[in-house]
């Protein structure tokens, strides 16, 4: 079945460091890909999305490119801030009508001042 | 103004009890979901309703019964609670076919 694999955390970086969180997926058909973020004590929020191959999603300085050839959707940010500390989830939505989203296991990111 | 709300936020109860968690959305969406997040943050869908009809029912014990009285509400009732049911339960909503799902703040259930 479809699945999402993302790098295990926790990831700890200093402020202004470059961030990469790896994500790969297994899917039949042409899924849509997402990154969701969960701040402490809150629900998940959509961070960015890409709906077809070679699309780049971007928001709040974060970017991810839908790479069909490597089945990847890595999250990057050039200069992280303390406020980026959260858990990040890579996810895919199957291309059926049921709107089912499959989440990766989450990567906890901590940024040191 | 809260888009997706859940009650209660925290729920502590003993094994064997029956409890309910309520969810309401004021976004006008036609699809609602329940997710379970375990202690390792792994998030898994449990149920989805579209216009009050069950459309996703993952492998969940039949002690869990969702109920959707109308499009804006999706409640989760759990019978005979077990230790393994301890988790954070998230409600979410979306418009059918839309990419983004909007999540509630979660209900932390602790079974002792």
Image (cartoon, coloured by chain):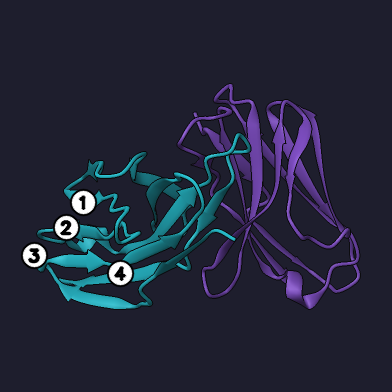
Chain colours: A cyan, B purple
Tell me if mark 2 has few (under 14), some (14-19) or many (20+) residues whose alpha carbon lies within 10 angstroms of its own.
many
Work out which quarter of the rendered image holds the C terminus of chain A and state it: bottom left
Disc 1 secondary structure class: strand
Reading the image, the residue beneath label 3 is A16
Separation of residues labelled 1 and 3 (CA atoms): 13 Å
The residue that disc 1 covers is: A62
Label 4 environment density (alpha carbons within 10 Å; few <14, some 14–19, many ≥20): some
Q: Is residue A44 left or right of residue A50?
A: right
Which residue position holds label 4?
A109
- Whether the residues at callouts 1 and 3 have beta carbons within 8 Å, the answer is no
Residue drawn at x 20%, y 59% as measured from the top left: A76
Q: Earlier in the sequence, mark 1 or mark 2?
A: 1
Q: In terms of depth relative to the viewer, which is nearer, B77 or A48?
A: A48
Q: Position of residue A45 (x, y in %)?
A: 41, 46
- Spatial distance from mark 4 to mark 1, Cα to Cα? 14 Å
Q: Are marks 1 and 2 on the same chain?
A: yes
């Amino acid at each position: 079945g479809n699945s999402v694999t993302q790098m295990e955390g926790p990831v700890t970086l200093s402020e202004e460091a470059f961030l990469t969180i790896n994500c790969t997926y297994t899917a039949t058909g042409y899924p849509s890909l997402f990154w969701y973020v969960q701040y402490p004590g809150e629900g998940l929020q959509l961070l960015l999305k890409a709906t077809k191959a070679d699309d780049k999603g971007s928001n709040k300085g974060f970017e991810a490119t839908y790479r069909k050839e490597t089945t990847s959707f890595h999250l990057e940010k050039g200069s992280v801030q303390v406020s980026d500390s959260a858990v990040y989830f890579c996810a895919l939505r199957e291309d059926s009508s049921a709107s089912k989203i499959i989440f990766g296991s989450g990567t906890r990111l901590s940024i040191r001042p | 103004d809260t888009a997706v709300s859940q009650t209660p936020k925290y729920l502590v109860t003993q094994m064997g009890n029956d409890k309910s968690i309520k969810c309401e959305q004021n976004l006008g969406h036609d699809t609602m979901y329940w997710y379970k997040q375990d202690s390792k943050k792994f998030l898994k869908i449990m149920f989805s309703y579209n216009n009050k009809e069950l459309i996703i029912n993952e492998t969940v014990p039949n002690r869990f019964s969702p109920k959707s009285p109308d499009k804006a509400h999706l409640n989760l009732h759990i019978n005979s609670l077990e230790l393994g049911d301890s988790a954070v339960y998230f409600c979410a909503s979306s418009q059918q076919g839309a990419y983004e799902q909007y999540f509630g703040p979660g209900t932390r259930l602790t079974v002792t």
